[in-house]
Each structure stands twice: as structure tokens, then as C-alpha cells.
DNA sequence: CTTGACCCTCCAGTGACTGGAACCCTTATG
DNA sequence: CATAAGGGTTCCAGTCACTGGAGGGTCAAG
């Protein structure tokens, strides 16, 4: 498989696949003409990476996951721990967004949104918390 | 006020304040010795920026908000529109995180997390969606 | 033989900072 | 007066995970 084939198969952009090689997540072979060629195993790894990334795992997480994936002896608790830590991080971010959403929705609600210049959104952003 | 004073007053790191000057969000004056000195207006703007940033507005959003904030003639609907667009973006991100959380929680739930190597999390990441 | 679709590398940029080096200014103390 | 601590300054590089573009080689079809 050439790079565009594996790109089509995995949904990952060509640029991204080259980048993943550069940072040693994958090591595809090379043809005589210098083109990368991808084995089934490479394709699987890339698909794996794509899914892990879309679940929000960082590249470093992915490296760990890939290592665990390739290590047939590892305990499932290792993977579980990584996923659990990641889940907590996701929930933290989600809580933050919830907080932001509530605050902002409240402000928008209070704002008339008409031709007059007085706007509670700006008023709140400008409010001096010191005094 | 020197930079560390305004940093303490606003909670923004010194480095961030210098960065905000570099990208022309603020234009503090300079003393004879080359030190920046910050007026009350600068301090207000920085506090405004800090709050807008913590609500997740991008630097570009902040630039718009500051312009609107300084423009006494603008209609509140302009601000409202910006905030509304931003709110939708926040909700989109939150939905994504919710989706990720549910998927991951489901996988973690299915994983025994013991010494055995079989792990549904990795199995799912590795699953070939093509076939 | 030419065209167009591939492929390659290398360099630079993104957003919003952050860290560090190297240096200057101010104030207090021995 | 020397010095040391604790401000301040600039500039350069790095972060993360790509993304865009220039400039050029390769391949298959017409």
C-alpha cells in the first residue's frame, strides 16, 4: 500500500501519517523509488492510532497504548489505569466547559441584544472584582 | 504599577502580560529605565482579558470584545452575537467530550483490570471497522 | 512525449503561551 | 563602596499535533 491508500483506509491525512513516522510511531518500509510502503500491520497501527486520538488520547498516551498493544504479556490493569486517568482528565475538562457554558448562557440571557449600548456581558467582564 | 504588581492584581503571569503587549492587546507606557508601567486602564483591560480567556474566548475573540468594549456606540446585539457563537462552540466541544467520556467509561467498565492480558479497551481500539 | 496524479523532503507557521539565558536597574546591607 | 537580592528587560527556543507550501522526483495513461 502506498501512503494515499493507507490514508484512505484509515481516514488519516497523508501529512499526519508522515508525521507519525517522523516521531517513530510507525516505521513503514521503503520501495526502491523511495516511496513508503505500508504493511497490513502498519495499517492496523494507524487505524489504532486514529481511534485512540479521536478518543482524545495524547500522542504520548498513544505511544504507551501501542507499546501495551504490542506487548502480549502486559496486564489489562495497565491499560485500564491509563484509560482511567484519561477518563478523569476528560471529565475535568467537561466540568470546566459546563461551568463556562452556564456562565456564558446566563450572561447572554441577561443581554437584551438590541441597538442600545448597555450590555451585561461586557459589564460583567469589566467588573472590578477587587472593589 | 510595574509588571509584577499588575500580574498580582490580575492573576495573569508576567510572561503572559508581556505577550499580550507583543500582540498589541495592550500598550503600556515605559518609564525612563525601560520598565513598563501600567495605568488603571491597562489593569482593567488585563483583568477583562483574563476573564474572557478563562471563559474560553480565543485571543481573536478577545480582540473583538475589547474593541466592542471600547466602542461606546456599539449595539449590545454585536456582543451578544459573539458570545452566542462562542457558546455554541463550547456546547459542541462539551458534546464531544461527553461522547468520549461515555465510550471510554463503557470500555473501562468492560475491562477486568487484572493480571490477565485480555483487555476490551485494546481490543476495541484494534478492531478492524472495515471488515 | 506530455500530462496529471502521485510521491518525496524540507522549511515555516499555527495558538497561546512558557522556559531560559544573558543582561540592566534598584535597593538594602556590611 | 562593593555586593547581593530581587526586580526589570530582550531574544531565542520549545511546546503540541499537526498543516501548508515550495520545489522536485516518479509513474501510468493517452
Image (spheres, coloured by chain):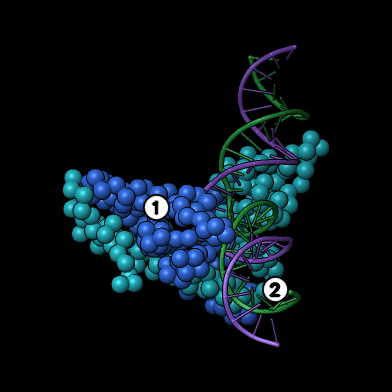
Chain colours: A cyan, B blue, C purple, D green
User: Do the residues indicated by labels 2 and 1 lie within the same chain of the protein?
Assistant: no
Q: Position of residue B20 (x, y in %)?
A: 49, 55
Chain to which the residue tagged by mark 1 belongs: B
Out of D12 and A79, give the one closest to the viewer.
D12
**Which element is circle 1 on?**
helix
Residue B44 pos. (x, y %): 37, 61
The answer to which quarter of the image holds residue B47 is bottom left
Work out whether residue B80 or residue D5 is closer to the camera in this orientation and state it.
D5
Q: Quadrant of the N terminus of chain B?
A: bottom left
Give the left or right position of residue A34, taking residue B56 as reference: right
Q: Compare residues A73 and C12 and report the one nearer the observer.
A: C12
Give me the chain letter of mark 2. A
Q: Which is closer to the viewer, label 2 or label 1?
A: 1
Which residue is the site of mark 2?
A73
Residue at which label 1 appears:
B62
Residue A13 screen position, x and y as percent: 58, 44
Determine the residue positioned at 31% across, 61% down.
A126
- Is residue B65 positioned above or below C17 on the image? above
| Residue B10 seen anywhere in this rendered image of the structure | yes
Amino acid at each position: 500500500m502506498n501512503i494515499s491508500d493507507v490514508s484512505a483506509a484509515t481516514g488519516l491525512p497523508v501529512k499526519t501519517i508522515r508525521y507519525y513516522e517522523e516521531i517513530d510511531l510507525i516505521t513503514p518500509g521503503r520501495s526502491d523509488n523511495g516511496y513508503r510502503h505500508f504493511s497490513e500491520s502498519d495499517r492496523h497501527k494507524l487505524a489504532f492510532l486514529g481511534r485512540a486520538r479521536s478518543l482524545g488520547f495524547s500522542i504520548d498516551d498513544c505511544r504507551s497504548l501501542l507499546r501495551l498493544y504490542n506487548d502480549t504479556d502486559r496486564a489489562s490493569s495497565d491499560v485500564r489505569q491509563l484509560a482511567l486517568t484519561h477518563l478523569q482528565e476528560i471529565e475535568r475538562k467537561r466540568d470546566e466547559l459546563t461551568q463556562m457554558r452556564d456562565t456564558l448562557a446566563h450572561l447572554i440571557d441577561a443581554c437584551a441584544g438590541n441597538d442600545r449600548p448597555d450590555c451585561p456581558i461586557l459589564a460583567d467582564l469589566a467588573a472590578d472584582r477587587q472593589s
